Amino acid sequence: MKIVIFGASGRTGRHLISQALEQGHMVTAFARTPDKIQTRHERLRIVQGDIHDPAAVERGVDGQEAVLCALGVNRGEEAGALAEGTQNITRAMKKSGVRRIICVSAAGFLGEQADFLLGRMLFWYFKRYLQKLFDAMKQQYQVLEASGLEWTAVRPFLLNEGPRKGNYRVATDGIPSKGYRITTGDTAEFMLKQLECPDYVRKAPAIAY
């Protein structure tokens, strides 16, 4: 499959690149700073561009079959910047006839509750000190909902840098019971699985061990 990865130079994006190539996909990596992407492969094309530049986004999306979005909230940017970038992606997708998009989001912005003490403490901390992140993810989610596309918003709870471990759990309501950690490697694996799986289309599954 031909896929484009936005946020390709980030923590999850790098795992998406390597795993997508392992699976035989044709990969376009879209990044503001291409030098941060160390991988080189005959099936990897690196496109330099800013997510806030609609023309650059269109060049990245053109000719693709699906979009993987691993954008984060950059320091100094307003919360709405993530939604603006995602809006540029969805508009480019409609223009190019691309229907499938899988995004990394975050558990908590939907007002989820945890069923264990540590989870409740983490949610309290996140909502108190990371409200900008939740606001950004909520606005991005609203863009996806309004797009009419076949979207999935993947909600990791506490996202740690690390390889695939497997045996993670998925919940569509709230978060997995007593689960709060997931690695970037497993998050990437779950996202790539959604390219062929219709189970979570227009849903926001949470993943955790």
Image (cartoon, rainbow, N blue to C red):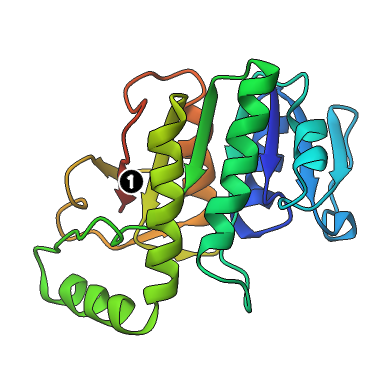
Figure check: 178 above or below 7: below
> Front-most of 157 and 126?
126
Q: Is residue 28 visible?
A: yes
Residue drawn where x is 89% and y is 42% of the image: 40
Q: Which residue lies at the image location 20% right of the left edge and 50% below the top edge?
A: 176
Q: Tell me if residue 188 comes above or below residue 37 in the rendering.
A: above
Q: On screen, 167 above or below 65?
A: below
Query: Given the current orientation, which residue lies at the most extreme left position?
Result: 115
Q: Quadrant of residue 37?
A: bottom right
Identify the residue at horizontal 75%, vertical 42% (top origin).
54
Residue 148: percent from the left, percent from the top? Answer: 43, 24
- The quadrant holding residue 151 is top left
Where residue 60 appears, as percent x and y from the top left, is 78, 34
Count of marks placed on residues: 1
Quadrant of the image for the N terminus? Answer: top right
Indicate the secondary structure of the residue bearing disc 1. Answer: loop
Q: Is residue 96 above or below residue 204?
A: above
Return the x and y of residue 25 as percentages of the image width and height. 71, 23
Residue at the spot of label 1: 168
Residue at 37% x, 75% y: name it: 131
- Residue type at mark 1? Tyr
> Would you say 25 lies left or right of 59 here?
left
Residue 15 is left or right of residue 30, and the answer is left
| Pick the front one: 115 or 108 | 108
Q: Is residue 195 left or right of residue 98?
A: left
User: Alpha-carbon neighbours of circle 1 within 10 Å: few (<14), some, or many (≥20)?
Assistant: some
Whether residue 105 can be seen here: no
Q: At which x and y percent is residue 81?
A: 59, 61
